[in-house]
Image (spheres, grey):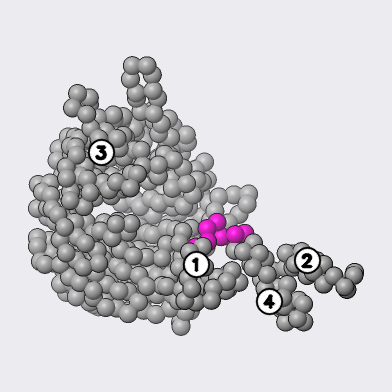
């Protein structure tokens, strides 16, 4: 090697270092000055980041306040994930947030650190909770501060949020829908759906804001902007409440249905029909060819692939069927096509009528039924099953790194994804987070999580629910 051309030495070292793990690369950097210079090459660490994670938050490198680097990003994110994987004492802080005087009916992140944009240098997150005490409360979960509390109204029944527009939307027991400014808690607008039960679905289409509301009378109202201006009203299930309401990843389709009637089929409706209806045309709508919908989810990595748990011909047996939704246009009309992709019976060891269904990617479904958590491939293979809960699972939260289940046994089970190149992704149980004493509480009822925190509600025996916040820091 020509020592008169030191850049050749550096280039060769950088190439060799591409074969090293992060631990070996760190060790190599302490050998000598040349190795140290080669080992801190940003390209090496950028390459390792993109090999390990499908998405990295490039925006953190644009800050001039802190000296960021690909190496620092890699090490801090690995350190955070190691903490979240092990869950040892000291890896996280736990806070109890008290203030509600009724049951918590829902939790949402107003500002969170998602797995798609984990900002490891700014872990502040805001969570909003709604309660039967008639209030919405906004919390800074890192320090446990109450940011604002809404005026008391009728008992709340549902809450959702739109992080993009920093808006919170609630429904109460009279059917009054309200939108709130997320930073201040100021009421923005209201709409009366005249329904004791409302299911809320918020979505954005081309930067336009929409809210679909399912009612107890079987209608779906669609409202525009935080001003809640009504756009359309469609009846989807006569006299039965709409408690299934989903939007496809491409925002072209809404699925609406009821879990309260075994003879009714869920329907797929064009969002264009809901958000921009025409007076002389009926909504573009198509029934899904199954009955007795028990749970449904759109596959997040597909434009419009829908998985549904429904009844089959045998009593107490359930089937999971996957459909692709598309639009067929002819010269004279357009019609929705719902084409079956896969269908398989579920091997359930419970008679529970409550099913929770989530999807991780194009080939992985997570199902909770009773005390059991299962992972299925879209081909119907049972990849994993967890039966270590002593009471029924009440809520699940799934992202690209973890799955967290809440249970009436007063613990949160944390599982992490293990990828297998030849098979569907599988979950691996890691640890349980305890929520308190059974003498004071009845169990967890809701759980949400972002990239660095887990927030859950605990049902109190005195009727006053408490929020439990577990924060992991890098």
In the image, residue 334 above or below residue 465: above
Residue wearing tag 4: 26
The numbered dot on residue 275 is 3
- State which tag comes first along the sequence, 1 or 2: 2
**In terms of sequence position, does the residue under pointer 3 or pointer 4 come before the other?**
4
Residue topped by disc 1:
62
Query: Chief secondary structure of the magenta span?
Result: loop
Q: Secondary structure at mark 1?
A: helix
Contact between labelled residues 3 and 2, with CB atoms less than 8 Å apart: no
At 47% from the left and 76% from the top, the residue drawn is 65
Segment colored magenta? 50-57
**Residue 408 shown left or right of residue 34 in the figure:** left
Q: What residue did someone put label 2 on?
A: 11
x 12%, y 46%: residue: 193
Q: Is residue 407 above or below residue 230?
A: below
* Label 1 Cα neighbours within 10 Å, binned few <14 / some 14-19 / many ≥20: few
SS of the residue under disc 4? helix
How far, Cα to Cα, is label 1 from label 2? Answer: 27 Å
> Disc 2 versus disc 4: distance between alpha carbons?
18 Å
Q: Where is residue 317 shown, x and y percent of the image?
A: 37, 41
- Image: 308 above or below 284: below
Left/right of residue 410 with respect to residue 14 in the rendered view: left
Q: CA distance from mark 2 to mark 3?
A: 57 Å
């Amino acid at each position: 090697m020509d020592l008169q051309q030191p850049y050749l030495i550096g280039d060769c070292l950088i190439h060799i270092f591409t074969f090293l793990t992060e631990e070996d690369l760190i060790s190599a950097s302490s050998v000598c000055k040349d190795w140290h210079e080669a080992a801190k090459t940003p390209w090496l660490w950028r390459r390792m980041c993109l090999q390990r994670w499908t998405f990295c938050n490039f925006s953190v490198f644009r800050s001039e306040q802190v000296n960021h680097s690909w190496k620092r990003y890699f090490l801090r994110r690995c350190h955070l994930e190691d903490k979240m994987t092990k869950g040892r004492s000291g890896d996280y802080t736990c806070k109890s947030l008290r203030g509600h005087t009724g049951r918590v009916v829902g939790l949402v992140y107003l500002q969170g650190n998602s797995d798609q944009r984990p900002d490891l240098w700014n872990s502040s997150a805001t969570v909003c909770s709604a309660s039967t005490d008639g209030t919405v409360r906004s919390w800074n979960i890192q320090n446990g501060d109450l940011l604002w509390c809404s005026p008391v109204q009728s008992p709340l029944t549902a809450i959702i949020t739109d992080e993009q527009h920093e808006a919170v939307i609630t429904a109460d027991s009279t059917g009054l829908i309200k939108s709130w400014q997320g930073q201040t808690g100021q009421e923005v607008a209201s709409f009366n759906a005249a329904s004791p039960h409302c299911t809320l679905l918020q979505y954005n289409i081309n930067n336009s804001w929409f809210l679909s509301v399912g009612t107890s009378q079987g209608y779906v109202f669609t409202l525009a902007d935080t001003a809640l201006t009504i756009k359309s009203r469609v009846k989807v299930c006569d006299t039965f409440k709409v408690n299934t309401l989903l939007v496809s990843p491409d925002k072209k389709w809404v699925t609406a249905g009821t879990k309260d009637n075994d003879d009714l089929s869920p329907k797929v409706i064009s969002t264009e029909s809901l958000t921009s209806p025409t007076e002389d045309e009926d909504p573009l709508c198509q029934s899904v060819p199954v009955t007795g919908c028990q749970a449904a989810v759109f596959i997040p990595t597909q434009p419009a692939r829908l998985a549904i748990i429904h009844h089959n011909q045998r009593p107490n047996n359930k089937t999971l069927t996957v459909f692709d939704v598309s639009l067929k246009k002819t010269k004279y009309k357009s019609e929705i096509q719902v084409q079956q992709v896969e269908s398989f019976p579920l091997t359930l060891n419970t008679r529970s009528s409550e099913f929770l269904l989530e999807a991780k990617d194009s080939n992985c479904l997570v199902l909770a039924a009773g005390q059991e958590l299962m992972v299925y491939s879209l081909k119907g293979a049972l990849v994993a099953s967890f039966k270590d809960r002593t009471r029924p699972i009440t809520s699940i939260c799934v992202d690209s790194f973890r799955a967290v289940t809440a249970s009436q046994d007063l613990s949160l089970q944390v599982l992490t994804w293990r990828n297998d190149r030849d098979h569907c992704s599988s979950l691996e149980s890691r640890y349980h987070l305890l929520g308190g004493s059974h003498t004071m509480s009845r169990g967890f009822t809701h759980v949400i999580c972002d990239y660095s925190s887990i927030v859950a509600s605990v049902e109190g025996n005195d009727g006053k629910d408490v929020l439990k916040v577990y924060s992991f820091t890098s």
